[in-house]
Amino acid sequence: MRKSVCEKLENYSGYIGTNQLLKAGVTNRQIGTLTAEGALEKVCYGFYWVNKASFRKPKEYKAIEVCISVPKVVICADSACFYLGLISAEPAFLSAATSREDRRAIKMNFPVRRYYFSESNFWEAHHVVTTDFGSYQTFDLDRSVCDCIRFRKNIDTYIFDLIIERYREQMGAQEKRLQAYARRLHVLNEVQKYF
C-alpha cells in the first residue's frame, strides 16, 4: 500500500464511514486493500474501525456497532443489564430489540439475538448513551429486568440468576417502577415470581 494512503488514515481513529474515507481521497479499491491488510476492520456495510496498535475498541463496541448498522436498534434484556452496570459478566449474545416492522438484517462480527417489540411499547423507557466513539440506545434497568424475565429461556442460566440477584440487592424503591413496566409489558405474573 502506498505510504500516502496509510498517512491519510493517521488522521482518523475509531469508527469511520466509507463517505469519510472517500472524501479523504481513499478509493474503494484502496479501502478493500486496507481491509485485507488489517488497517481497517469492516464493522458493517459502509462503516469501518481504524486499527491502530495504540488504540483499542471501547468496552461498549458491540452496542455501538449494532446501532451503527441498524440505527433504530435498542440494546435490551441481559445486554442492557451488562452495559448499565448491573452485572459484570458479558452475555455471549448481544440482545438487540427492534420494532416488529423493522426487518433490516443485522449482520455483525459477533453473535446477536434479536427481539421484536410492538411499536406501542418499543420506545418506552429507552435512553441514549453517548461515548467518545458513538452512541447507542438502551432500555432502562427496570424494563431490562422485565425483558430478562420475559425472555429467560434465551438467556444463559448463570447470567439470568446473576441479574435477578443483583437487581434484588439494589431494588428498594424501584419495586413500583418494575411492576409498572411488568404490567405494561404483560409479564406481571412472571415478574412477581421473582420479586
Image (spheres, rainbow, N blue to C red):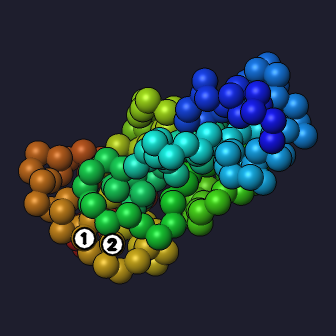
- Mark 1 is surrounded, within 10 Å at the Cα level, by few (under 14), some (14 to 19) or many (20 or more) other residues, namely some
Q: Is residue 166 above or below residue 58?
A: below
**Residue 54 pos. (x, y %):** 46, 42
Residue 187 or 11: which is nearer the viewer? Answer: 11
Q: Which residue is mark 1?
A: 162
Q: Secondary structure at mark 1?
A: helix
Name which residue lies at 59% across and 66% down: 111
The answer, for residue 38, to whether it is visible in the render is yes
**Residue 185 pos. (x, y %):** 43, 53
Would residue 180 appear left or right of 51 to someone viewing this image? left
Q: State the image quarter where residue 69 is shown.
A: top right
Amino acid at pointer 2 = Ile
Position of the C terminus by quadrant = bottom left
Position of the N terminus by quadrant = top right
Q: Is residue 104 above or below residue 95?
A: above
Q: State the image quarter where residue 28 is shown.
A: top right
**Residue 109 pos. (x, y %):** 64, 60
Q: Which residue is mark 2?
A: 159
Q: State the image quarter where residue 127 is shown.
A: top left
Would residue 154 appear left or right of 88 to someone viewing this image? right
Q: Do the residues under discs 1 and 2 have CB atoms within 8 angstroms?
A: yes
Amino acid at pointer 1 = Leu
- Mark 2 is surrounded, within 10 Å at the Cα level, by few (under 14), some (14 to 19) or many (20 or more) other residues, namely many
* Distance in Å between CA atoms under marks 1 and 2: 5 Å
Residue 7 or 22: which is nearer the viewer? Answer: 7
Residue 49 or 59: which is nearer the viewer? Answer: 49
Name which residue lies at 84% across and 46% down: 32
The mark tally for this picture is: 2
**Residue 6 pos. (x, y %):** 71, 34
Q: Secondary structure at mark 2?
A: helix
